[in-house]
Amino acid sequence: MAHFEKAKNLNEWMDQRLAVNTLKKVMNTEYWIPKNINFLWAMGMVLAATFGILLVSGIFLLMYYQPNVNLAFDSVNYTIMSEVGYGWLWRHVHGVGASVVFLIIYIHMFTGIYYGSYKKGRELIWLSGMGLFVAFSAEAFSGYMLPWGQMSYWAGMVITNLFSGGGLHADFLVEWIRGDYVPGQAFLGRFFMLHVLLIPLAIIGLIVLHFGSLRIPHVNNQDGEEFDFAEAAELYKAGKVKESKVIPFSPVFLSKDVLVMGVYFIFFFYLVFYHFEFAMDPVNFDPANGLKTPTHIYPEWYFLWSYEILRPFSTNVGLIAFAIAQVIFFTLPFLDRSPNVAPASRRGLFKFWFWALLIDMIILTFMGKLPPEGIWSTIGLVAALTFMGLWIALPIITSREKKL
Amino acid sequence: MKELKIFGIVAVFTLILYWGVEPFAHSQMHKHVKGADLVYNGAADIVECEQSKKEMKKAFWADVQKIAALKGDAAAGEATYAMCAGCHMEGAANMGGVIPPSLDHAGAIYDKNFLIALIKDPAIATNVDHKYADTMAHPMGSIKTMVSEPQDIANVVAYLQAKKAGEVTPKEAYVEACSRCHANRYGKLTQLGEIPKTKSNIATGKDIDAMKYQEKVATEEASLANYLGKLPPDLSIMIRARSEHFLHTFIEDPQSQLTGTAMPRTGLNKEGMEKVFAYLEETGDPSKPLREETGPKVLLFFIIFTALAFLWKKSMWKGHH
Amino acid sequence: MAKNEQGRRDFIGMALGGFTALGGIGALYAMKRTWDPLPSVKAAGFTTIDLKDAQDNVLVVEKWRGKPIFILKQSADMLAKVKEDDKKRLINIGDSHYVVCVGLCTHLGCIPGYDAGDQSFLCACHGGMYDSTANVTKAPPPRGLDIPPFRVDGTKLVLGETGPEYEKMLADGTTLKV
């Protein structure tokens, strides 16, 4: 048994047993963040806050949701929306949150791409982040099944059909995933389990990994500059806060984080109360009907770019293109052959690559929503081919990049 | 300033993304139907119908206008109304597929020209004549021969507007105009009326009265589905499943949004439409009042929060720049 | 206490924290309301019981708010044996007298059984006993079986609503509020 002296106060008592003061230094007051950053660096905390909001609103929805094909729709649209005290609020918060979280994820992702925050020691941050993107995508898809509306049913039907592998005709696999020939009770039950337990646990684990992988390389900065954190920390602690290149996470960086979150919450709750149809599509307010496909089915906006890569090609080609699109982002740290950690604006052709990718994905998003007819399918095809072309070009462009 | 520029770029891309995915895409997916502003003069019907029927319809609606110009005698109309009451009465049976709706507030919620047209020829008035070889086959078709004199029609309509009007609640408007075909389970309404309260048998745990009622409803629904081709959807949450514009134009002239549909035009006037919409909102969006009340408070909270956060940030960052 | 670099109290930080706590209280209120019983649950709390077919000394069991309700019509000789104190437990409709009470032992909630021969209730869980008016005769139950709110409507009783007879029972302590 280690030797324990009598503690003088509560803080000392906790510190003797849990090293709270060391934890406080390591995680907060002496966790050094570069000063040369902008508000985009707060997106991570905004995501954590949004995940928290989704978790809490989800808890209250879970109290009344019935994962049964006959009861699910009304448990949400009647019980929760009209009977449960503030049930409508949790539902709106959860639906809007599930959509807005992807906006922030994409902003966060593209910030990382722009500033080269996936290179030279930061590969695991990028990979765990992409893992989180996949986990959030699975969480969003499984969650969308739960209200058991028309869109829930038909999205479930279409997406599970992908697993037949086109020409492979792996129907047995599709039936195994569904637990039935079509999406039904078995399907709803397992996606409920995934949404409420398994995927949230995976997300929490990945968040821990994401934070852990960030600690040693430290947060990047607007110029991609590599500097001595220990030296900058000493300067700061000596009181030279203006000269130092770093700030402590708490309270300095946190205070800016909180400001960004305040602005974000105004935007978020404006959507929750006044402008929520984009997140709660009218088609899903028709109860699921296995004998009638809606005139227009489409995934939620954040899946549209990837959906559009699937659509313009023949079945097997489309499936391969789709599969590639899902994993290609993981390979970014390895396809980018340049050693430069710098904002895209200073990286020659990479600058054009970045904006071309962003605009291409926005075009793919638009086309994914539009009916696959006439000029829209042509544009969609061109955009899908451009997407592939950009990723093939990446190693070529970056290997010829001038070293900064 | 650089941060403001970056924020501007993010905001612009977000707004472009929103525009493409929502307003633009929806405008491409759903053709815009103008609607007739609740004017029932058959203008849209004449445009929509096949060539061979256009003359007939023009003449029909011109006749309706003529009848509308006559002065109706409500007292005389009351006697004629007896022809209607035979079917449109409390506890009426199913007639040719549907139970005739109550007319208790018909004068208040339906348009005058529509009522005239309806008595003249129900199938043409409701724009479902393309479903019948002979419009006499319409469940209400026989009214054409029973009340055909222009003055008689004017009198009955005057009677409706005088004696079958008055204050109407949203629920009453819905029950009279919609519920014979469209159930509303959130409002506890079936095509047979309000779901009665029943009690389970204490020994068996089964509620026989409820089961018997369910059987009656199921039989009625089967009859409706047979008559119309499919069961009209439950409207509990329809207010969130379709846009307000769609519902408005659809109720006014179903053919304009869903060509070939079996749904008849309802002939609701402005008051009727408002009351029906109010009921649809009662069952489909009951949290709306509280949501509109709470919204400003929550936003105000976060505006003050952000202001305080800004001050805190400034104080924490003093001397750092 | 949060202090900034100069060692002064971080007032604005505390103000922000306090204001955020206010928001937290608002959120907690919404959460509390989400736990409240639903309106449909509370509305279902009314049951109508028709007493006209009840027989003397035959226990009838109904359900109200998920709980068993005992209805025991008093025969002439049962009435004769009723103690003075217990008379206020009876409901008088026309010529008949009834005991209407919640069939859950006031000790810990088990359902007591009725012995028509003995004209008494026995709770098997811990041996508590009640007489023919469901007033307690043997410990451990602390009081007689509770009487639910009721309103007399002809030969019917509407449980869940209150009437003058029930109000009187509440006022003179015959029953606690259920």
Image (cartoon, coloured by chain):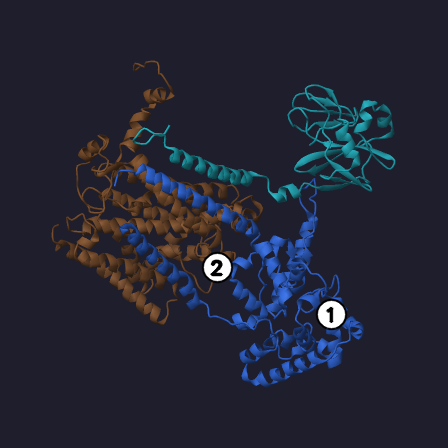
Chain colours: A brown, B blue, C cyan
Residue B294's x, y, as percent? 52, 47
Residue A185's x, y, as percent? 49, 49
Task: Evaluate if marks 1 and 2 touch, with contact meaning CB atoms under 8 Å apart.
Answer: no
Residue tagged 1: B160
Q: Is residue B128 above or below residue A188?
A: below
Residue tagged 2: A283
- Could you tell me which residue is drawn at 49 percent across and 55 percent down? A149
Placement of the C terminus of chain B among the 4 image quadrants? top left
Q: Which mark is residue B245?
A: none
Residue B194's x, y, as percent? 68, 55
Q: Amino acid at mark 2?
A: Val
Is residue A170 visible to the viewer in this orientation of the structure? no
Q: Image check: A235 left or right of B135? A: left
Q: Image check: C16 left or right of A229? A: right
Classed neighbour count for the residue bearing mark 1: other residues with Cα under 10 Å, few (<14), some (14–19), many (≥20): many
Q: Amino acid at mark 1?
A: Leu
Are tags 1 and 2 found on a single chain?
A: no
Classed neighbour count for the residue bearing mark 2: other residues with Cα under 10 Å, few (<14), some (14–19), many (≥20): many
Q: Chain of mark 1?
A: B
Helix, strand or loop under label 1: helix
Helix, strand or loop under label 2: helix
